[in-house]
Amino acid sequence: MSNQPVLIAGEWRESQAGKTFQSENPSTKEFLPEIYPVSSWDDCDDALEAASEAFEQMRELSGTQIAEFLETFANEIESRAEDLVKQANLETALPVSPRLADVELPRTTGQLRQAAAAARSSNWTQPVIDSANNIRSCFGAIGPVCVFGPNNFPFAFGSASGGDFAAAIAAGNPVIAKANSSHPGTTKIFAECAANAAAKTGMPASIVQLIYRTGHDVGERLVSDNRIGATGYTGSRAAGLTLKKAADAAGKPIYLELSSVNPVVFLPAVLEEKAEELATEFTESCLMGTGQFCTNPGMVILLKSDTAETFITSVAKQFSKAGVGTLLSGGVAKSLHESHAVLTESGAEVCAGTGEGSGVGYCAANTLLRISGSQFIANPEIMQTEAFGNSSLIVVANDLGDAAAVLTALEGNLTGCLYTASNGDDDGAYNILAPILRQKVGRLLNDKMPTGVAVSPAMNHGGPYPATGHPGFTAVGIPGSLLRFAMLQCYDNVRQNRLPEILCDNYAGQAQRLIDGVWT
């Protein structure tokens, strides 16, 4: 069987590759029949050249024209919904319904349409006009963007369909999509939809290009190439940091979403109030999607008490009784087992699970571990080993001071949550712990599990390192997410007819104006 073609310069063509790979069906542990190329630098070089030409053409396009492409792309996706769901289910074992068909696919088309609205309005460009000094600025497109998608969200975070893709295009940049090796066939269908949408809306042929996989050296060269504007990456910490090192050395922006244990603190009075209810709420969140969410609650912090022990016992029983889901790949299963080994060898006690699970295909037992606060404080780096999957670690602190020390030793995370009693009895403890946790996370929650990530303009799906590569940006939330793929462009004493429309005095929309030292 011949290799699947790559999409470069508007054409589906044979890759210039020396190696190939196949994706797996995680449910059967068998390779799927399609063969995909591992692209050489020649493919990347051609894609970069084509993207550079497309970028020059896109600079002449209006926000309305880009919006029309994004909206047409969303329509194309909906026309291929059955194909996409079927292929993604084969490659990831994620359930057809509700996960893929009813949740993730509508989210994907919804965020594309939100990105289209942002492109059409141009408000994301944040125009500022200082009339007195005749200085004006706004954000504008940065150049070709490379997007690396993750294994766990083939639609909503996919390299040719997801949030990074939507943000990069809406900001006026062409995208080179690097498919995740776990679901190349799904990404190919998205690229087909994008190519159709580009043809229907008169976009540059290279507005979207697709390669499936590269060697490590080629990937590093790609993100650091002079022609690249920026890179969006979601995936493992090790691979992401390798790419970051290469991009940083070349002075190229790269926005990473890496690992996060997402600590959840249950304070004493709320456990007294509803320990059993909270145990169920936590279990459902932790095991949802076999725990394969970047916002999965992978760490729980409790203050030592009889009620805390009751909570732990209840969670352990629920973990043991709950069904075991299929993991995304053999690699995910291997990594999860290795993480459990690191934690248990470092002193974590097993409350439930560990080892092979009783589910279908690649799986691991629903695993609950526990350590003391002093164990965590003595070895915080090891105790924050990410166990990506149906697993969580409970840290039992001796007292409030111990809990504060645990939070102080945390790495950066995407989310952090504190559960407190409704009668206010936990407020004193909250006031001590919340300021510490606030600086450790991108999104602080109260009395709510972190698993869901709403596509809201107010959302921050980011956080301090190592949750991401930069704490000032979000991967979810339009228009904020567009700024990762933009540059601040200043115009000093430039004539009106040479300015971007949004910076002209007669622009019909809104811009911040500095007149006599006052913002209007």
Image: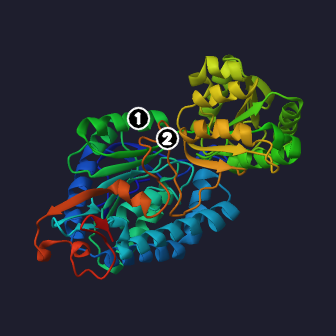
Q: Which element type, helix, strand or loop, lies under badge 2? A: loop
Which mark, residue 241? 1
Q: Is residue 242 visible?
A: yes
> Which residue: 74% across, 43% down?
427
Q: How packed is label 1: few (under 14 Cα within 10 Å), some, or many (20 or more)? A: some
Q: Nearer the viewer, residue 240 or 314?
A: 314
**For the residues bearing labels 2 and 1, Cβ distance under 8 angstroms:** yes
Which sits in the foreground, 64 or 129? Answer: 129
Secondary element type, mark 1? helix
Q: Quadrant of residue 188?
A: bottom left
Give the vertical position of 242 relative to 151 (above or below): above
Left or right of 233 in this view: 154: right
- Residue 333 image position (x, y, % from top left): 63, 36
The residues bearing labels 2 and 1 have C-alpha atoms spaced at a distance of 9 Å
Q: Which amino acid does the dot numbered 2 rest on?
A: Leu
> Could you say which quadrant of the image residue 431 lies in?
top right
Q: Which residue is mark 2?
A: 258
**Upstream in sequence: badge 2 or badge 1:** 1
x, y percent for residue 138: 27, 64
Query: Where is residue 139 drawn, in percent x and y?
Result: 29, 62
Relative depth, front residue between 35 and 485: 485
